Amino acid sequence: MTDCIFCKIVDGDIPSAKVYEDEEVYAFLDISQVTKGHTLVIPKQHTKNIYETHPQVASNLFARLPKIASAVKEAFQADGVNIVNNNDEAAHQSVFHLHIHVLPRYGKGDGFGLKWEDNSGKYTQDQLTETAHSIASKIS
Ligand code: 5GP
Ligand code: ZN
């Protein structure tokens, strides 16, 4: 896609700090380096977000994550790694070429935060079943 910055990175038209490349996948350092080693993993084939991604493209992309995440963790002896994928502006997607963030973690105050409300016990089993059915009915 001509006006996509990540396609331009794949094509070498915009410089990037490459971490890994094969026929289907490209991985490079995120310019923002939320934490040291913050890496983006993308399919070479342009796809806007997770919803529009062909299952085979998603499969190829995810298949590379174990070794890339392991390398990111090992390189700087991180304590852990978060794998994050944002879709739509409401979910903080700012580049509309599917990408997976690999974020090494170095303890409290390392630059990455995730608000995670625990609503355990808030819903009855019937309510959870109803919610699950709403989602299941949309899976084709
Ligand atoms: P999003 O917010 O869409 O999930 O993440 C997009 C990421 O792309 C951001 O973390 C941002 O720092 C990164 N980014 C945007 N432009 C460039 C660029 O030109 N080069 C690199 N390496 N990263 C970029
Ligand atoms: Zn693209």
Image: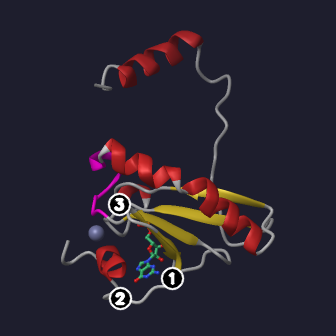
Residue 134 can be seen, yes or no: yes
Whichever of callouts 3 and 2 sits on the residue coming sooner in the sequence is 2
Q: Distance between the residues labelled 1 and 3?
A: 19 Å
Magenta-colored segment: predominant secondary structure: loop
Left or right: 4 with respect to 79?
left
Front in this rendered view, residue 117 or 40: 40
Q: Which range is magenta?
A: 45-53
Residue 101 drawn above or below residue 29: above
Nearest to the eye among marks 1 and 3: give it: 1
- Does the beta carbon of the residue at mark 2 sit less than 8 Å from ligand 1? yes
Q: How many C-alpha atoms fall within 10 Å of the one at disc 2: few (<14), some, or many (≥20)?
A: few
Residue at horizontal 45 percent and vertical 54 percent from the top: 61
Return the mark for residue 31.
1
Which corner quadrant holds the N terminus?
Answer: bottom left
- Does the beta carbon of the residue at mark 1 sit less than 8 Å from ligand 1? yes
Nearest to the eye among marks 3 and 2: give it: 2
Q: Mark 3 points at which residue?
A: 89
Q: Distance between the residues labelled 3 and 2?
A: 23 Å
Please, what secondary structure does the residue beneath circle 1 have? loop
- x, y (%) of residue 83? 58, 56
Q: How many C-alpha atoms fall within 10 Å of the one at disc 3: few (<14), some, or many (≥20)?
A: few
Front in this rendered view, residue 130 or 75: 75
Residue at horizontal 44 percent and vertical 21 percent from the top: 131
